Amino acid sequence: MELQFLGTGAGQPSKSRNVSSLVLKLLDEINEVWMFDCGEGTQRQILETTIKPRKVKRIFITHLHGDHIFGLPGFLASRAFQANEEQTDLDVYGPVGIRSYILSSLRLSGARLPYRIHFHEFDETNLGKIMETDKFVVYAEKLDHTIFCIGYRVMQKDLEGTLDAEALKAAGVPFGPLFGKVKSGQDVVLEDGRKIIAKDYISAPKKGKIITILGDTRKTDASIRLGLGADILVHESTYGTKDEPLARKHGHSTNMQAAQIAKAASAKKLLLNHISARFLGRECRQLEKDAQTIFENTHMVKDLEEVSL
């Protein structure tokens, strides 16, 4: 499971940062990639990665500002060009209006997709648990931006314990059907009368990962709720602490506010994202260091950077 950042800038692209988009790679878990936001130029960024567009099965949009959605028509059309690969349906989640935006863009440009898009639109009345599979569940909550904006909490369900095959073999259990029974949690009796207790050979369930990915937002309690105990919290850091009044005016957060949220949520790691183009190398490092005075495990991400969970 990895996060890869395709664009980490705010508002408009710069020489060092493209606009907002990131992917959650779940290839080992479910052989899928989930995308969060798709700013202009996202498909160009993908060319610098190992990501295959057909593997992107779900797209989650935080809000309808252009730097988060202007890359969607191009990406969706290019995904259709994978003619030598299996075409698979796509699910798109986002605020009311995302369906109209995508369909209008495709219709007016004459684009025809060989796959279906299943839309899941939200407003303030239908947030909460928005998706569940046998391995993952996703929650969404409204943030505090200048337009309706969503934060997402992705929760991996707890993983089953693993079988200690070597210990089982050492206990004299012959490889075959008995192994399968023990792995499924059944106690078994050997030919010599010994009873093998399944739980003694299966590790405890492993707690699933929690990834919180927030859209643009002022400092808000909703961010804390979404980020509670998260293994990784991705939080915008458009401004520095000196610009707090400007951040409030434009519906954004500072680096220090992001750190305060991570601390209040008891997150394990904070990734600062959505950085204003005004901040360059040395200034970015200072923003990161300042945030670390509040929340030590803070890191400012760069375009194309990968973070493993």
Image: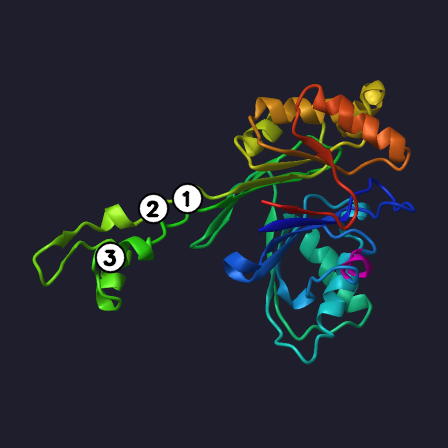
Mark 2 residue element = loop
Residue wearing tag 1: 206
Residue depicted at x 75% and y 58%: 72
Residue wearing tag 3: 182
Q: Residues within 10 Å of mark 3 (few under 14, many from 20)?
A: many
Residue wearing tag 2: 203
Determine whether, in the image, residue 128 is placed left or right of residue 103.
left
Occupied quadrant, residue 16: top right
Would you say residue 213 sits in the magenta stretch?
Answer: no
Residue 252 versus residue 139 in the image, above or below: above
* Badge 2 or badge 3: first in the primary sequence: 3
Amino acid type, residue under disc 2 in the picture: Ser
Residue, far left:
193
Amino acid type, residue under disc 1 in the picture: Lys
Residue, far bottom:
84
Would you say residue 44 sits in the magenta stretch?
Answer: yes
Q: Nearer the viewer, residue 104 or 56?
A: 56
Real-space CA distance between mark 1 and mark 2, rounded to the nearest whole angstrom: 8 Å
Which segment is the magenta one? Answer: 42-46
Q: Position of residue 130 (x, y in %)?
A: 52, 47
Residue depicted at x 72% and y 65%: 76
* Badge 3 or badge 1: first in the primary sequence: 3
Work out whether residue 154 can be spotted.
Answer: yes
Real-space CA distance between mark 3 and mark 1, rounded to the nearest whole angstrom: 18 Å
Amino acid type, residue under disc 3 in the picture: Val
Q: Position of residue 267 (x, y in %)?
A: 57, 30
Disc 3 versus disc 1: nearer the observer: 3
Real-space CA distance between mark 2 and mark 3, rounded to the nearest whole angstrom: 12 Å
